[in-house]
Image: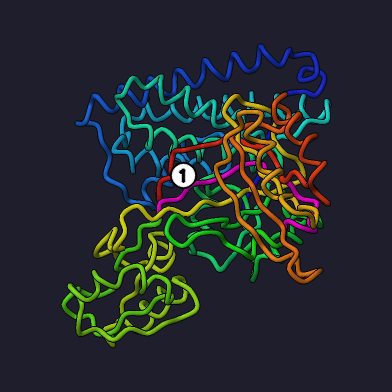
């Protein structure tokens, strides 16, 4: 169970602190944190060996309780993964102190936001911060590592300030679960759902703050279930996640002892050539998910069982990833959407998703699409789906490279109304082009 941090700041003090001053203090703390990490990267002799029980004990003895023990551990685990493990007691104490001080500053920001009726979670500010922090490392630490470490730092803050709950297409250990963690970190609470509609309903009813669902795959195209649910849902798209899908071979036995492979049929299809070349004599058994496959591989290890899937499933069941990235297509990427009650303000690099249904008139679709061309708006995606209300009537899902508040988009939508029986803006959000890692 996650425990909340104790707060030392009085409400009257919080309400009289200018928001910009607190953000400047957070920037200063971030600068110090990056400096510590840069120094660690340049001092490899101080790198720590990772023994979970020892790490937890050491961190707990240093922490003053303002951040939950699990959250500090998740942050430090990413520091270890980046090859920046810290053993020096003084440096480690300074690191934890800065994290606690940052949490107090974020708490003040959260209280001010609540007073002004603003959302605690702001995905557009998150991406801007990650890019700035990456530039501050001056290339000493990879952007991938900076993002992974700060993903957990921000996750701890979100868990404390907003008790964030994230619904996702389950079960645990799937790529959708991994995508959600890559966005929100380990400290928030996750609610696995049995199907797409349950994710939407969970958010719509207020049981979760946000939902994460797949929308398209680079090799297999659009996810029609997600597209269809947007027709009647009041929810908005507020962010996207790009996840490179890298399946691997996991087991609790040596590779030469493998007799049977378990996985989801889609994974077997994606890894067909690798399996034929490397494990041609292994039986292939299809199961409902890669998580289920990992569970069976653990339970039946003595019978020669192994599984194909992602690193999160291996971590959950204590399996060793014997081979990584064994999919036949190395560029297999899935795009996920984060859905919530509100969309995002303009960032200067945005994407807008919308759907419309054209009037039953000759040339209406062509005229509809020409409205975007007339305003020099790039259309990055278009999909059609049956409306399921009238025969041969279709909805068209379109992504354009601009924000719905941009002047040229507003003009295009006004013209679009002349040719459509229905128009619905699904949301505007930052057009992130960097794939999330599988850390």
Between residue 223 and residue 16, name the one nearer to us.
223
Tell me, yes or no, whether the highlighted magenta stretch contains residue 242. Answer: yes
Secondary structure of residue under mark 1 = helix
Residue drawn at the location 64% of the way across and 71% of the way down = 194
Residue 16 spot, x, y in % from top left: 79, 14
- 391 above or below 109? below
- 349 above or below 342? above
Residues shaded magenta = 229-244
Q: Is residue 66 visible?
A: no
Residue 47 spot, x, y in % from top left: 25, 36
- 210 above or below 168? above
Between residue 141 and residue 124, name the one nearer to us.
124
Residue 288 spot, x, y in % from top left: 50, 78
Residue drawn at the location 31% of the way across and 34% of the way down = 84
User: Where, quadrant-wise, is the N terminus in this rendering?
Assistant: bottom right
Q: How dense is the environment of label 1, judged by Cα within 10 Å: few (below 14), some, or many (20 and up)?
A: some
Residue drawn at the location 39% of the way across and 62% of the way down = 310
- 161 above or below 354? above
Q: Is residue 427 left or right of residue 378?
A: right
Between residue 90 and residue 369, name the one nearer to us.
369
Residue drawn at the location 38% of the way across and 81% of the way down = 299
Q: Residue tagged by mark 1?
A: 73
Residue 424 spot, x, y in % from top left: 78, 47
Q: Is residue 190 visible?
A: yes
Tell me, yes or no, whether the highlighted magenta stretch contains residue 355. Answer: no
Q: Is residue 143 left or right of residue 222?
A: left
């Amino acid at each position: 169970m996650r425990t909340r941090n104790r707060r030392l700041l009085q409400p009257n003090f919080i309400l009289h602190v200018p928001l910009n001053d607190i953000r400047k203090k957070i920037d200063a703390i971030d600068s110090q944190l990056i400096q510590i990490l840069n120094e660690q990267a340049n001092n490899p002799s101080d790198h720590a060996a990772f023994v979970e029980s020892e790490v937890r004990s050491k961190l707990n003895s240093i922490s003053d309780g303002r951040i939950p023990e699990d959250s500090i551990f998740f942050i430090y685990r990413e520091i270890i993964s980046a090859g920046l493990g810290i053993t020096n007691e003084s440096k480690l104490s300074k690191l934890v102190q800065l994290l606690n001080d940052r949490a107090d500053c974020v708490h003040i920001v959260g209280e001010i936001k609540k007073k002004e009726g603003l959302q605690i979670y702001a995905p557009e500010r998150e991406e801007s911060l990650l890019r700035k922090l990456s530039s501050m490392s001056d290339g000493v630490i990879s952007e991938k590592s900076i993002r992974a470490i700060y993903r957990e730092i921000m996750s701890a803050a979100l868990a404390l300030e907003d008790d964030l709950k994230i619904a996702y297409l389950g079960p645990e250990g799937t790529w959708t679960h991994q995508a959600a963690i890559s966005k929100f970190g380990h400290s928030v609470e996750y609610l696995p759902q049995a199907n797409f509609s349950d994710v939407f309903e969970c958010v719509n009813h207020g049981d979760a703050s946000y939902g994460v669902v797949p929308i398209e795959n680079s090799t297999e195209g659009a996810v029609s279930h997600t597209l269809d649910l947007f027709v009647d849902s009041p929810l908005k798209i507020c962010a996207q996640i790009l996840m490179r899908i890298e399946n691997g071979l996991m087991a609790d036995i040596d590779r030469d002892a493998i007799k049977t492979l378990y996985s989801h049929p889609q994974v077997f299809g994606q890894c067909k050539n690798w399996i034929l070349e490397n494990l041609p004599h292994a039986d292939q058994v299809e199961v409902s998910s890669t998580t289920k496959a990992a569970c069976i591989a653990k339970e039946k290890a003595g019978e020669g069982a192994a599984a194909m899937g992602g690193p999160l499933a291996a971590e959950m069941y204590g399996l060793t990833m014997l081979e990584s990235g064994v999919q036949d297509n190395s560029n297999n990427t899935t795009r996920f959407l984060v859905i919530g009650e509100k969309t995002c303000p303009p960032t200067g690099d945005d994407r807008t998703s919308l759907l419309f249904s054209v009037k039953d008139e000759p040339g209406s679709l062509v005229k509809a699409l020409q409205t975007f061309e007339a305003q020099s708006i790039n259309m990055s995606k278009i999909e059609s789906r049956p409306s399921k209300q009238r025969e041969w009537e279709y909805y068209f899902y379109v992504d354009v490279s601009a924000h719905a508040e941009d002047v040229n988009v507003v003009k295009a939508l006004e013209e679009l109304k002349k040719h459509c029986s229905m128009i619905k803006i699904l949301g505007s959000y930052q057009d992130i082009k960097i794939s999330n890692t599988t850390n």
